[in-house]
Image (spheres, coloured by chain):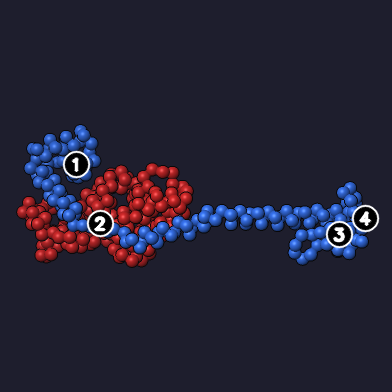
């Protein structure tokens, strides 16, 4: 091919990427250049072969089913929002329970809201008896209770 | 999100699988790679802000395929185009006509399958998927000028391969 036209222009023309002016420019060139016209025709033939050759691989139906199952598996918490809410509620409950137990323990050790400071807090349950007769009944797990000695 | 995920990304499963099949060249492995790609897409779906979902998904699949090829068939990346072997000389009209008349589906598949993975990729995206240069640029992450030159070289190489196959009487 003797002409100096950029090969990319011919391919851009074939692919419809040149726009209106570029297309007109190449078409004008093809009308006068037998070599480029032949080249374009040969590329069209190869493109036609590709189109006729049934090169497309369609996805098997089983694959689509497998992928459909991916989304719910990844988003179980969204399918069961109540489950997520219970986890949060349980977590907050534990935190509040611990804080309440500490607070009640502090009250029990001081005997009143405005009693002695925390420096004299009892070390054991026996020491936790307060002057007004209440003591802290705090089992290994569960809610701590303040009981009044009969 | 699952419903939106299915609506937006599942319609492109054929395009995704087609690209994976041509890059991986094994049905079973392509299925695995497609599943992995969809999992990745699901992980990053919150970051998808609309736009061309096919290009977005093809980009993920393409990267997943390249990771798979790099891990399982690293030699494929070294199969670069040899300018000396493939001179790119123009074919005569009679040879082209012979090519067109004799090339069959199997021959074309074989020729396309022998190309380096980068050439296969750009040809599949353009000739089979019908993506524009801009879309190919988005999927592959290279400038449009590079897409054009890659496509040109890939076509030249494909034509050489087709000629070689028809020359052998395929």
Q: How many marks?
A: 4
* Position in image of residue B54 (x %, y %): 35, 49
**What chain does mark 4 sit on?**
A
Task: Decide which of tag 4 and tag 1 comes sooner along the chain.
Answer: 1
Q: Quadrant of the C terminus of chain A?
A: bottom right
Task: Decide which of tag 2 and tag 3 comes sooner along the chain.
Answer: 2
Q: Are marks 2 and 4 on the same chain?
A: yes
Query: Which label sits on residue A147?
Result: 3
| Residue found at the very far right of the displayed protein | A131
Mark 3 packing: few (<14 Cα in 10 Å), some, or many (20+)? few
What is the secondary structure assignment of the residue under circle 2? loop
Residue assigned mark 4: A132
Task: Decide which of tag 2 and tag 4 comes sooner along the chain.
Answer: 2
Q: Are marks 1 and 2 on the same chain?
A: yes
Q: Report how far apart the C-alphas of labels 1 and 2 lie in the structure.
A: 24 Å
What is the secondary structure assignment of the residue under circle 1? helix
Q: Are marks 4 and 3 in contact (CB under 8 Å)?
A: no
Residue displayed at 15% across by 48% down:
A44
**What chain does mark 2 sit on?**
A
Task: Decide which of tag 1 and tag 2 comes sooner along the chain.
Answer: 1
Depth-wise, is mark 2 or mark 4 nearer the camera?
A: 4
Residue assigned mark 2: A56
Q: Are marks 3 and 1 on the same chain?
A: yes
Q: Chain A is which colour?
A: blue
Mark 4 packing: few (<14 Cα in 10 Å), some, or many (20+)? few
Residue assigned mark 1: A13
């Amino acid at each position: 091919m003797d002409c100096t036209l950029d090969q990319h222009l011919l391919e851009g023309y074939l692919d419809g990427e040149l726009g209106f002016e570029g297309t007109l420019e190449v078409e004008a060139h093809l009308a006068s250049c037998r070599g480029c016209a032949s080249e374009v025709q040969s590329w069209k033939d190869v493109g036609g072969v590709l189109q006729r050759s049934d090169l497309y691989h369609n996805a098997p139906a089983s694959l689509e089913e497998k992928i459909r199952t991916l989304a719910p598996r990844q988003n179980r918490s969204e399918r069961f929002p109540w489950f997520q809410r219970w986890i949060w509620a349980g977590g907050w409950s534990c935190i509040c329970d611990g804080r309440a137990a500490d607070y009640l323990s502090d009250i029990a050790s001081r005997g009143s809201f405005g009693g002695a400071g925390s420096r004299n807090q009892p070390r054991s349950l026996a020491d936790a008896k307060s002057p007004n007769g209440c003591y802290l009944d705090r089992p290994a797990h569960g809610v701590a209770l303040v009981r009044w000695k009969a | 999100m699952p419903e939106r995920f299915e609506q937006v990304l599942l319609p492109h499963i054929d395009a995704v699988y087609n690209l994976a099949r041509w890059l991986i060249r094994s049905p079973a492995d392509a299925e695995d790679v497609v599943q992995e790609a969809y999992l990745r897409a699901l992980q990053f779906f919150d970051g998808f802000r609309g736009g061309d979902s096919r290009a977005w998904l093809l980009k993920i699949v393409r990267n997943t395929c390249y990771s798979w090829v790099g891990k399982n068939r690293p030699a494929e990346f070294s199969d670069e185009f040899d300018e000396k072997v493939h001179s790119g000389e123009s074919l005569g009209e009679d040879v082209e006509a012979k090519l067109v008349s004799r090339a069959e589906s199997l021959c074309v598949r074989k020729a396309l399958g022998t190309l380096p993975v980068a050439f296969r990729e750009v040809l599949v995206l353009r000739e089979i998927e019908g993506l524009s240069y801009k879309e190919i640029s988005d999927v592959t992450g290279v400038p449009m000028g590079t897409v054009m030159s890659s496509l040109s070289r890939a076509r030249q190489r494909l034509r050489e391969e087709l000629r070689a196959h028809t020359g052998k009487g395929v």
